[in-house]
Amino acid sequence: MSNLNQILIEGNLVRNPELRRTPKGTPVCTFSVASNRFYKQDQDEEFQKEVSFFDITIWTELATNCATTLKKGRGVRVIGRLKQDRWQDPEGKQRSKVHIIADHVIFKPEFKGKKSERNGRVAEYEEANAF
């Protein structure tokens, strides 16, 4: 039986990407993405904001492209899979961390106009590129 492990995250980079290489020379890029969610607990309440942070790892040519193209604040859409790392800390406690291994990274356009003008173009872009 085959299992499904796929995730799609959209958000903005929290920090500039970091590029490094494995001992064999394979490029690896890492960065973090903040993804916002707005919701109401009750119909009469105002919207609440929830921010989640996700660590992303990218390999090979895509890693090099991300490291040279992306910067803090840039919007991205990441398609990949979840990976869990497990280890034992120096005190003997079991630790784990889940991060995303990216297969595809879509760079959202950068807007350099006024904020109100930029919001209109973002809405047009999101409507045109909706899944």
Image (tube, rainbow, N blue to C red):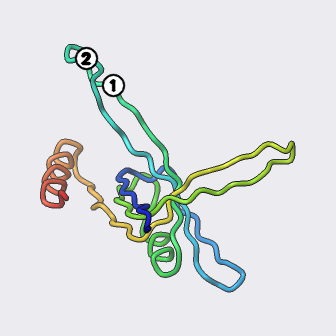
Q: Nearer the viewer, mark 1 or mark 2?
A: 2
Assess disc 2: are there few (<14), some (14-19) or many (≥20) residues with their C-alpha within 10 Å of its C-alpha. few
Quadrant where the C terminus is found in the figure: bottom left
Locate residue 78 relative to residue 23 in the image: left or right.
left
Q: Is residue 9 left or right of residue 44?
A: right
Give how far across and how far down residue 49 sits, in percent: 36, 30
- The picture places residue 110, in percent across and down from the top left corner, at 30, 59
Quarter of the rendering containing residue 22: bottom right
The label on residue 37 is: none
Q: Residue at x 14, y 47 (%)?
A: 120
The local crowd at label 1, few if under 14, some if 14 to 19, many if 20 or more residues have their Cα within 10 Å, is few
Q: Residue at x 80, y 48 (%)?
A: 89
Amino acid type, residue under disc 1 in the picture:
Gln
Q: Nearer the viewer, residue 36 or 88?
A: 88
Q: Earlier in the sequence, mark 1 or mark 2?
A: 2
**In the picture, which quadrant includes the N terminus?**
bottom left
Instruction: Give me the disc on residue 42.
Output: 2
Left or right: residue 105 versus residue 22 is left
